[in-house]
Amino acid sequence: MTKNIEFKDYAKDIKLNLSSILKSDPESSLKENQIYGVALSCAYTTKNSDLVEFVLEKAEGKISEEEINAAKAASSIMAMNNIYYRFAHLVSDKEYLQMPAKLRMNIIGNPGIDKVDFELYSLAVSAINGCGLCIDSHVKQLVNSKVDKSTIAHTIRISSVINAVAQTLFIN
């Protein structure tokens, strides 16, 4: 049974954007499994169970159990890191940036999937959570891994649309 998401007239743009972001973009090198992994990471981040169910159903057969677990891990670890590093970045006393975080985050070093894929998931989640320092860090890692700007932009489009779908579902 496919989970349907109802869009009212005011959210027509969001509906159309949702259908387009879950497809390959000729200017982006995101593969199908990466698209759905990013979308699922973002769906978990929105905390909307209907949206998570929708993305899981759309992703069936397109991503592995390891990628599903990594999407959960990216959403969870970034929920912690994005708060900590957003604080350290935004507080006027920059000494906080020099202090060790003293937070366990081993999953980042061993996510169980390709590290570039996990960086894409983490970037998308960090965009939703609004941590500029984390966004910069993930973009730098991706660029160092030879990921092009179109692919990074595609990742952020997925993030923004999934976030907008969650907002639309809340409004409805």
Image: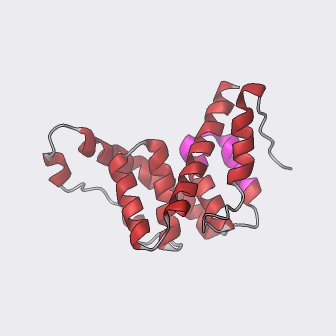
Question: Residue 29's spot in the image, x, y percent?
Answer: 60, 69
Report the span colored magenta: 43-57
Q: Identify which residue is drawn at 36% across, 47% down.
A: 132
Question: Residue 7's spot in the image, x, y percent?
Answer: 76, 33
Q: Is residue 162 left or right of residue 83?
A: right
Question: Residue 52's spot in the image, x, y percent?
Answer: 66, 47
Q: Is residue 120 left or right of residue 103?
A: right
Front in this rendered view, residue 146 or 104: 146
Front in this rendered view, residue 165 or 52: 165
Is the C terminus in the top left, top right, bottom left or bottom right quadrant?
A: top right
Q: Identify which residue is drawn at 42% across, 68% down.
A: 143
Q: Identify which residue is drawn at 66% across, 69% down.
A: 64
Which residue is farthest front?
A: 27
Magenta-colored stretch includes residue 132: no
Residue 151 falls in image quadrant = bottom right
Secondary structure mostly seen in magenta is helix
Question: Residue 73's spot in the image, x, y percent?
Answer: 50, 59
